[in-house]
Image (cartoon, rainbow, N blue to C red):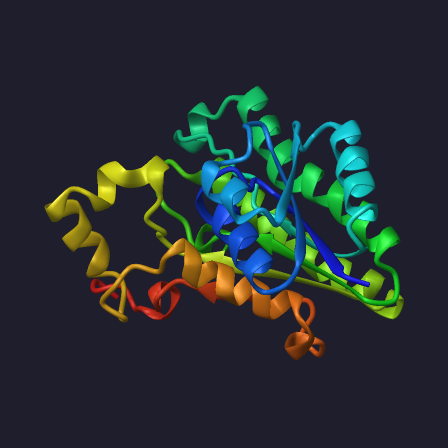
Amino acid sequence: MRSVALVTGAGGGVGSAVASTLAAGGWAVVGVDLVERPACLAAAGAVEWVVGDVRDETSIGRAVETAAHLGRLSGLVTATLTEHRGALEGLDRRALAEVYDVQVAAAWAWSTAVADAASGDGSIVHISSVHAQRAAPGMAAYAMGKAALDALVRAGAVEWGRQGVRCNAVLPGFVPVQRNKERWCDPSAAESLLAEHPLGRFVTAEDVAQVVAFLLGPYARGVTGVSLPVDGGMLATLPRWA
């Protein structure tokens, strides 16, 4: 029976790259997003689609039901993104709650559903961030959400391991996608960003997707509870002023 993976936030950026990579690797994929299926995924013909809010339990039910018609649900990737920028003192409670709901509470709800369905042989990968391990001005809400997501990874690995369900995360650094193009399309801004990458190049959404595919697949069957940086060496770099 064909393996099926759910990918939330599949409408663009890393999520879209993950859906495409998994489909190319033989997975049946169910993408979930607030937007309609992108043309690039529709053309692939291997990605089914659910339009819905990841915080809505009916979206989970529809995605799981769609997966049941395709094969055996055994994978989940949560790549839904939301962020709120602002200093700690001025953080808005409602904005902070929204970040938590999308990045953590929704990821927990989807993980629980897939862990139940995939008992015996399942794999969950959350898209976290280097912000989970480092701080940057104005990014506190986003960083707190990603750090909590990493905690969910460890809890999932411990509590679901005996069910045969693995739980991991990847921590991308700066990934050039449509929503941040003003940074990588500007030569001076791009040069400054590249200086923080020992590899001397940006990590692409496809680079991240390949690592996600590895963690979902059989070659990583001994890997669980890990938050793996896919950042071009950003976290390994000692700040110049240290």
For this view, does 70 lie left or right of residue 44? Answer: right
Residue at left 41%, top 39%?
139
Q: Where does residue 226 sit, x and y in percent of width and height?
A: 62, 68
Number of numbered markers: 0
Whether residue 228 is visible here, answered yes or no, is no
Q: Quadrant of residue 10?
A: top right
Residue at left 25%, top 63%?
201
Residue at left 75%, top 61%?
3
Q: Which quadrant is the N terminus positioned in?
A: bottom right
Residue at left 65%, top 65%?
216
For this view, does 147 lie left or right of residue 195? Answer: right
Q: Where does residue 49 sit, x and y in percent of width and height?
A: 64, 37
For this view, does 185 lie left or right of residue 173? Answer: left
Q: Quadrant of residue 215?
A: bottom right
Looking at the picture, tell me which residue is in the foreground, 25 or 206: 25
For this view, does 236 lie left or right of residue 166? Answer: left
Looking at the picture, tell me which residue is in the foreground, 50 or 155: 50
Whether residue 27 is visible here, answered yes or no, is yes
Q: Where does residue 40 sit, x and y in percent of width and height?
A: 46, 43
Q: Which quadrant is the C terminus positioned in?
A: bottom left
Q: Quadrant of residue 73?
A: bottom right
Q: Where does residue 59 sit, x and y in percent of width and height?
A: 74, 31
The answer to whether 120 is drawn above or below residue 62 in the figure is below
The answer to whether 112 is drawn above or below residue 206 in the figure is above
Looking at the picture, tell me which residue is in the foreground, 162 or 212: 212
Residue at the farthest left position: 188
